[in-house]
Structure formats: structure tokens, C-alpha cells
Amino acid sequence: MRLILYTGKGGVGKTTIAAASGMRSAELGFRTLVVSTDIAHSLADVIGMPLEARPVEIAPNLWAQEINVLEEVRNYWGKLQEYLAMALEKQGVNGAIAEELAVIPGMEEVVSLLHIRKQAMEGEFDRVVVDAAPTGETMRLLTMPESFQWYAGRIINWSERTMGLVKPIIRALAPGTDVLALLPKLMEEIKALRDVLTDRTISSYRVVVNPEKMVIKEAERALSYLFLFQYPVDAVIVNRVLPPELSVDPFLRHMQEIQKGYLKTIENTFRPLPLWYVSQYDREMVGLEALSQLAQDCFGAEDPGQIFYTGQAQEIVQEGENYLLRLPLPWVEKDKVSITKRGDELFVTIGNFKREIMLPNVLTLRRATRARFSAGVLEVQFSPPTTT
Ligand SMILES: Nc1ncnc2c1ncn2[C@@H]1O[C@H](COP(=O)(O)OP(=O)(O)OP(=O)(O)O)[C@@H](O)[C@H]1O
Ligand SMILES: [Mg+2]
């Protein structure tokens, strides 16, 4: 079973590429499910067919599904939420506030993920391709298993202490069901989920970009978080690439020249990750036939369901009170390294190789105190912030 998740800035082509990969994987004979976890679904529009909250077969070997997250949240969490609100009210918290507090942050994300894991566990599909929400939300989704554990742990502790007060109410509220037993069970499920999501032999994360400044920056930031949480990233998809032959039309020619610069930036920024390119089409690529063509344009004869990269493209390790950022740059000739850190950006120069690295929060607050480049790996040391 393979789980492939596409993310990227809003509008870059995530849904299109996810659907196209799914289509190609199905054509190659793998039972493939394309599933959208974005609340603002557009998978049905891209595929050109109505979809449902359960997997629907839309072509040989190909299923598609749009998870109805809000409804699931209600089904899955309704009882627990009611209980929490009631326990809070019992402690003197005003009704509306109690209800608000009872909403565990990230429930929607957890529901989507559990759903995907269920598909993975039931083993009906060889591949599950996930069309995720734009980067920010996806990062929230992927960091969720960590923060959820913390939050649920607090609730369990807290409810153990207040059990005496509320037990009779729970009994009345949900006779025969042990609402509180739900949480530890859920915590266990989420732990298992995190194991699947970080398993390199199962999961691959791909970031979709366009040759545009802000899109590249956002992708870099997303990648720094994926690496930090050790989610295996195996490719970057560059979508909307104009043909390289310069056009006679001055407007298009200008666009091509701008893109050329960003395509270079993309190479510098994302290698050693494999890069796959998709042309800018002169029409909307919707419907299975168009998607199949797009997938072949992108991956050629390659199977989009394979694992494209197994290395760790960036790593943050702890060393005493410092963190080390490790970045393999195997193609860079050994030379003197210089670094400059400005806020959440780190500028690296090694000989004539230049790269800007967007840092995750954990490093933004620290000082970059040492950099060295040896055996094809750049290592930057981040020390705790100076206290004044
Ligand atoms: N290479 C391309 N050539 C032409 N049109 C494209 C290309 N890639 C995507 N599109 C079109 O761009 C629009 C946005 O694409 P898509 O819905 O796949 O993006 P998205 O990243 O999923 O967006 P959202 O963040 O809103 O979910 C769609 O109308 C799609 O058909
Ligand atoms: Mg989309």
C-alpha cells in the first residue's frame, strides 16, 4: 500500500496533479483511490464527475472520494464534545463558552487522517492519493498528531479529577456508552496513524509549485516543516511551465524570461529532491482523458506511485543545547561557506552556489552560529537566542 499526498499553495494545481497521478496509477494496473480532504472540494470538477463521501469507482482501477469532514466530525466527536461541554458547565463555565471550549482544535484534520488510515488499513487499494488542502492547513493537519496527543492527555487528566461530579450526567447523556473511553482509544489510533504517515515505505509527500516567487517560498516553508516532523518527501512537481522556445509575442516572451529565472531558483532550492515538470496548457485540464495526458507529460513512462526519493533532504538534529540543520548538497563542489540569517530566512553561499532557506519557527528564534560544508553535506549550527 502506498499513500501519496500532494500539497502546495492555493491554486497551484494540487487537485489536478493528484487526480492525474491517480489516473495514471490506475492505467498502470494499480487499484487506486484519489481522495480529497480539502473542505472546499474541487476534485469532482477536475475529474468531471459527481463524487460522494464514500469511494466511487470512476474508471477501471480508479476510485475517487470527497470526505465530508464536517459531518464526520459531528458523528465521531459529537458525544465527546457534548460531554466536555457539560463537564465544563458543571464547573461553573457559562453554557456558550463551555461549548466553545469543548471543541478540540484540529478535530477536522484528525477526522480526515483517520479516514485515510482506515482506507490504508482495510487494504482495498494499492495506492491512496490524497489531494490535500493548501499548505498552511496541511501543515496543521500533519503536525496535528503531535499536538493532539498533548491536548487529549490534558483532557483525560482533567476529567479523571472531575469524574465524580459528572459521572451521573454522562450516564444520563449516553446510556451504555463509555464516552471517556473514546479518548484514549483515539490517542492510540492517532499514534498508529502517525506511524503510517512517517513510514517511508508507505507514505510520500509531494509539494506542487509554479515558477513564481511566493509559491516557491511557501513550498520551502512547507518542506521545512515536513522535514522537521520527518514526513518523507519524495518529489517536487513544477506546474504551469511555459515552453522553452522563446515566443515572438512580447508579452509571452517576457513571461518566459521571468519563468526562466524562477526555474533556476527551483533547481537550486529543491534539489536533491527529484523535480517533475508539467507544461502550462492553453485549456483547462479537466476530465479523465486530459488528466491522463497531463500525467504522461509530467511523469513520462514512470509510475507516479513509486517512491522517487528515499534520502532525507533536510534534517534538524539536537546536539546539546544547539540544533544542527543538515542539508545534503552532493553536487556542490567543496568550497568556503558563508551564511547570513535574517529573521526566518537563511542565505547560504558555497562557492558560486547560492540558496535561501526558509526556517521553521524553532530555528527562526535562534542564532546561526556556525556553518561548515563537508562530504557534500552543509551543516549549520543554531544556538539558543541570547537572553538580555
Ligand atoms: N498545467 C496547467 N495548465 C492549464 N491549466 C491548469 C494547469 N494546472 C492546473 N490548471 C487549472 O488551474 C486551476 C486550479 O487548479 P487546481 O484546482 O488543480 O489547483 P489547486 O492547487 O488544487 O487549487 P486549490 O488550492 O483551490 O485547491 C484549475 O482550473 C485547473 O484546471
Ligand atoms: Mg484543490
Image (spheres, rainbow, N blue to C red):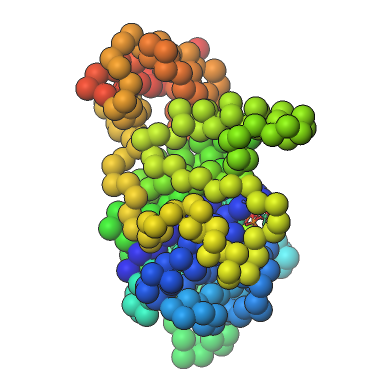
- Which corner quadrant of the image does residue 336 belong to? top left
Q: From this viewpoint, is residue 344 visible?
A: yes
- Report the residue that reaches farthest toward the bottom: 176
Residue at (31%, 25%) from the top-left corner?
Answer: 331
In front: 375, or 191? 375
Measured from the top left, where is residue 229 in percent x and y? Answer: 39, 45
- Which corner quadrant of the image does residue 204 belong to? bottom left
Residue at (37%, 56%) from the top-left corner?
Answer: 302
Measured from the top left, where is residue 84 in percent x and y? Answer: 57, 69
Up-down: is 184 above or below 372?
below
Up-down: is 219 above or below 267?
below
In front: 160, or 243? 243
Measured from the top left, where is residue 250 in percent x and y? Answer: 77, 29
Up-down: is 250 above or below 12?
above
Whereabouts is ligand 1, in terms of quadrant? Answer: bottom right
Residue at (38%, 69%) from the top-left corner?
Answer: 28
